[in-house]
Amino acid sequence: MTKDRPLILIGLLSFFLLFIQNCVIYSDDNSTPILQYEIINSFPHDPKAFTQGLVWENDFLYEGTGLYGRSSLRKLDLETGEILQQYNLPDDFFGEGITIFEDRIYQVTWKEKIGFIYDLNTFQLLGTFSYPHEGWGITHNGEYLIISDGTPILHFLEPSTLEEAKQVQVYENQIPINRINELEYIQGKIYANIWQTDRIAIIEPESGKITAWLDLSGILDPTDVNQKIDVLNGIGYDSENDRLFVTGKLWPKIFQIKMVKTTI
């Protein structure tokens, strides 16, 4: 038993180091800029919506929601928060992120490894596609659909075949960054919620390098916080008017924000 003790200790140490490495959310590298925010406006949001994806298209917000038995695809009026159109997923699917490519909406699901394709105007289900990993977020850069799976890996899919073309690992200071969640492609960068944090990573798509962080700490007023509130999740962008929207799971508001550089 005594002879085996060093091997046991080495094994435990190796497991601990691997566990710590896989749990990295963001590094302590101070060279990456941290941007702050200014709230420009706020809009009502369904506090029962477990937001997993947010997209702006043709003057409307589109939202993907999650939880088993409550997952949906929605079209929203920004000013009132009214649900104008809704498609409910089957109860055994946990809805995740959404994106709009051409005239179709793509929605991924969490552990089911199945994505749904809808007609943009009617929400008619046109088909499905599969992938060999979890689905967390999805966006596109005009060439590829881009899917996150909760790890540092981004999966780039050919829209015509829905086959994976390449992978890119997200990192900061050479350290892979985990828990990549909801995605939005904005002005040549991928914006990504980091699950269970108040930060959004701004990522260079080709290399996976995080070029900046957007810190949204304190964006919810204390009067809006209750036990049902969940994490920050949901990034939408109105490219025509350069408006950035953010929200969270079960949040009562959607915020229009402006990024502000930190001054020292």
Image (spheres, grey):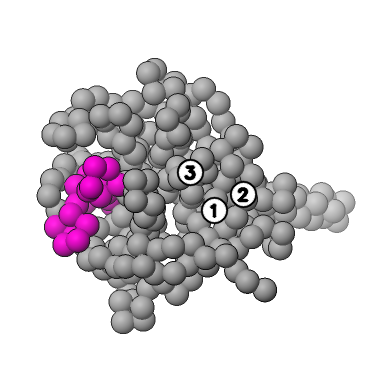
Residue type at tag 2: Ile
Residues under numbered marks 3 and 1 in contact, where contact means CB atoms less than 8 Å apart? no
- 11 lies above or below 215: above
Residue type at tag 1: Ala
Q: Secondary structure at mark 2?
A: strand
Whole-number angstrom distance, CA of label 3 to CA of label 1: 14 Å
Whole-number angstrom distance, CA of label 1 to CA of label 2: 6 Å
The x, y position of residue 219, in whole percent, is 41, 71
- Mark closer to the observer (3, 1): 3
The x, y position of residue 197, in whole percent, is 50, 63
Whole-number angstrom distance, CA of label 3 to CA of label 2: 15 Å
Which of the 4 quarters of the picture holds residue 57? top left
Q: Identify the residue under disc 2.
A: 210
- Give the residue drawn at x 53%, y 37%: 154
The x, y position of residue 211, in whole percent, is 62, 50
Residue 128 showing in the rendered view: yes
Residue 15 showing in the rendered view: no
Q: Secondary structure at mark 3?
A: loop
Residue interval drawn in magenta: 56-82
Q: Identify the residue under disc 3.
A: 187
Residue type at tag 3: Gln
Q: Residues within 10 Å of mark 3 (few under 14, many from 20)?
A: few
- 143 lies above or below 107: above
Residues under numbered marks 1 and 2 in contact, where contact means CB atoms less than 8 Å apart? yes
- Give the residue drawn at x 38%, y 33%: 113
